[in-house]
Image: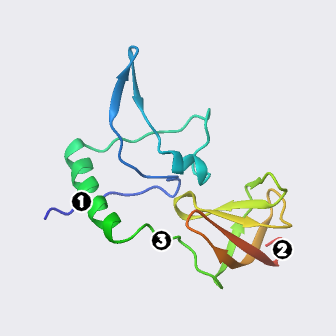
Amino acid sequence: MEVYTMEISDNLLCLFSARVQSEDGSYVIEIPQREIETGSVEADETYRVALISRERAESTTEETETESATAEPQPPVEPGEIRYVEIEDIGKQGDGIARVERGYVIIVPGAEIGERVKIEVTEVKSNFAVGEIIDEDL
């Protein structure tokens, strides 16, 4: 088995395999709906895209399919975990939103955009978590 090494930017929002498709004289890459739903990527925004060679993509897809059959990707946080986060956005119900590894969303009630807060993760779901503020303005 070959081992590939690559440097991953801290700005990486999501990672998935997709086919480049020809559509009306343009080429299109379809973004999985889960990336929009988790808040990693927003419709009508512009992003930098990196493409990895087809051989590597096929190898990664096979490895991912094998891993997916046994386990779904796990959230990057656990209940009771203490984190320092920066509130990047406000959700529809007025709660603060922070993003951590892989664009995973942590909802922080009572937080405002731009605040850096210390939180305790109180609830963890597959595509988001909820955190309670322990200390404000860090």
Q: How many labels does the image show?
A: 3
Image side of residue 87 versus residue 77, left or right: right
Do callouts 3 and 1 mark residues in contact (Cβ within 8 Å)?
A: no
Discs 3/1, front: 3
Q: What residue type is labelled 1?
A: Tyr
Residue ID for mark 1 = 4
- Which quadrant holds residue 136? bottom right
Q: Earlier in the sequence, mark 2 or mark 1?
A: 1
| Rendering quarter of residue 5 | bottom left
Which quarter of the figure is the N terminus placed in?
A: bottom left
Mark 2 crowdedness (10 Å alpha carbons): few <14, some 14-19, many ≥20? few
10 Å crowding of disc 3: few (<14), some (14-19), many (20+): few
Cα–Cα span, label 3 and label 1: 22 Å
Q: In this view, does 92 lie above or below 78?
A: above
Q: In this view, does 20 lie to the left or right of 134?
A: left
Label annotation for residue 74? 3
88 relative to 36, above or below: below
Quadrant where the C terminus sits is bottom right
x then y, percent, for residue 135:
82, 79
Q: How far apart are marks 2 and 1 (CA)?
A: 41 Å
- Direction front: furthest residue: 69
The answer to which of marks 3 and 1 sits earlier in the sequence is 1
Q: Which colour scheme is used?
A: rainbow
Residue marked by disc 2: 136
